[in-house]
Image (cartoon, rainbow, N blue to C red):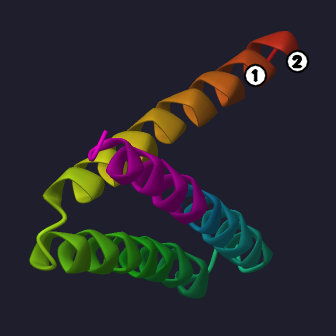
Amino acid sequence: MTFYYKIIIGLLIGLALGAVNFYLMSAFVRLAVKNAGRVRGVLIIILSYALRYLLIGAIVFSLAKNNEQMIALIVLAVLGALTMLLALRQQRKKTASGG
């Protein structure tokens, strides 16, 4: 019973972090598309990766440092699952549109 709350906390943090990560990614992609064909667009994409991974790394590192390795592992698992689900969803949209 003692580990169930850690699983739920890990799921909630992972879902929240995944939502923030997805929002940041879409905002930076829109900004980069406005600056397409320029060096500035490439720098925006590089900055977005750095910012998003820094955010994920800071949260996972702080959880691990506070002796919450199980929560940190669940957060990473949720982020991995969300990444795969969103990629699958995008692939299905692409095939449905005939592209």
Q: Amino acid at mark 1?
A: Lys
Residue drawn at x 27%, y 73% is 57
Q: Which residue is mark 2?
A: 97
Q: Are marks 1 and 2 in contact (CB under 8 Å)?
A: yes
Amino acid on which the number 2 mark rests in the picture: Ser
Q: Nearer the viewer, residue 1 or 66?
A: 1
Q: Residue at x 72, y 73 (%)?
A: 27
Q: Residue at x 61, y 35 (%)?
A: 86
* Secondary structure mainly formed by the magenta segment: helix
Per the image, is 5 magenta?
A: yes
Q: Is residue 35 left or right of residue 97?
A: left
> In this figure, which residue is indicated by the disc labeled 1?
94
Decide which of 50, 79 is in the foreground and name it.
79
**In the image shown, does 3 or 57 lie closer to the viewer?**
3
Q: Is residue 73 magenta?
A: no
Q: Among all residues in the image, which is located at the extreme right?
A: 97
Q: Quadrant of residue 21?
A: bottom right
- Name the secondary structure under disc 1: helix
Relative to 57, is 96 on the left or the right?
A: right
Q: Is residue 10 above or below residue 48?
A: above
Q: Relative to 11, does residue 67 appear above or below in the rendering? A: below
Residue 90 is left or right of residue 67, and the answer is right
Q: What's the CA distance linking mark 1 and mark 2?
A: 5 Å
Q: x, y (%) of residue 12?
A: 54, 55
- The residue stretch that appears in magenta: 1-17
